[in-house]
């Protein structure tokens, strides 16, 4: 990130989310594969009358991926 930005987040929950994304990427990426995390700070779309900034965090890897069936359940709350 080229400039400083402050965001109101729950640091514990954000830590859990990032740890889960990265640990899953590492767990399912074969030896010699790659895991990349990119953090972008972007301005909201001023044409839609939105003000402020947002953070986009992208984790990609060269692992096998997740089936469409399992992908539907990624953001469901567990028991």
Image: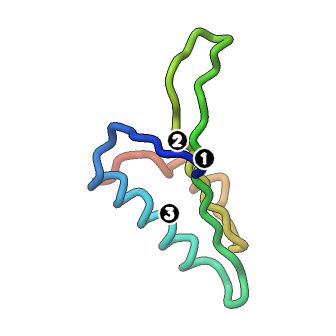
| Residue neighbourhood size for the residue with mark 3, other residues' Cα within 10 Å, grouped as few (<14), some (14–19), many (≥20) | some
Residue drawn at 50 percent across, 24 percent down:
52
- Mark 2–mark 3 contact, CB under 8 Å? no
Residue drawn at 57 percent across, 56 percent down:
70
Question: Residue 12 sits in which quadrant?
Answer: bottom left
- Mark 1–mark 2 contact, CB under 8 Å? yes
Instruction: Identify the residue under disc 3.
Output: 21
Q: Nearer the viewer, mark 2 or mark 3?
A: 2
> x%, y% of residue 67?
66, 60
Q: Which of 73 and 58 is in front in this view?
A: 58
Residue drawn at 72 percent across, 73 percent down:
62
Between the C-alphas of marks 1 and 2, the distance is 6 Å
| Residue neighbourhood size for the residue with mark 1, other residues' Cα within 10 Å, grouped as few (<14), some (14–19), many (≥20) | few
Q: Which image quarter is the C terminus in?
A: bottom left
Between the C-alphas of marks 1 and 3, the distance is 16 Å
Q: In this view, does 16 lie above or below 75?
A: below
Residue lying furthest front: 3
Instruction: Identify the residue under disc 2.
Output: 55
Q: Nearer the viewer, residue 6 or 68?
A: 6
| Residue neighbourhood size for the residue with mark 2, other residues' Cα within 10 Å, grouped as few (<14), some (14–19), many (≥20) | few
Residue 40 got which mark?
A: 1
Q: In this view, does 65 lie above or below 27?
A: above
């Amino acid at each position: 990130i080229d400039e400083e930005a402050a965001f109101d987040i729950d640091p514990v929950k954000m830590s859990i989310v990032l740890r889960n994304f990265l640990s899953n990427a590492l767990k399912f990426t074969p030896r010699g594969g790659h895991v990349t995390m990119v953090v972008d700070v972007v301005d909201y779309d001023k044409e839609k009358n939105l003000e402020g900034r947002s953070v986009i965090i992208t984790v990609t890897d060269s692992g096998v991926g997740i089936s469409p069936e399992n992908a539907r359940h990624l953001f469901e709350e567990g028991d």
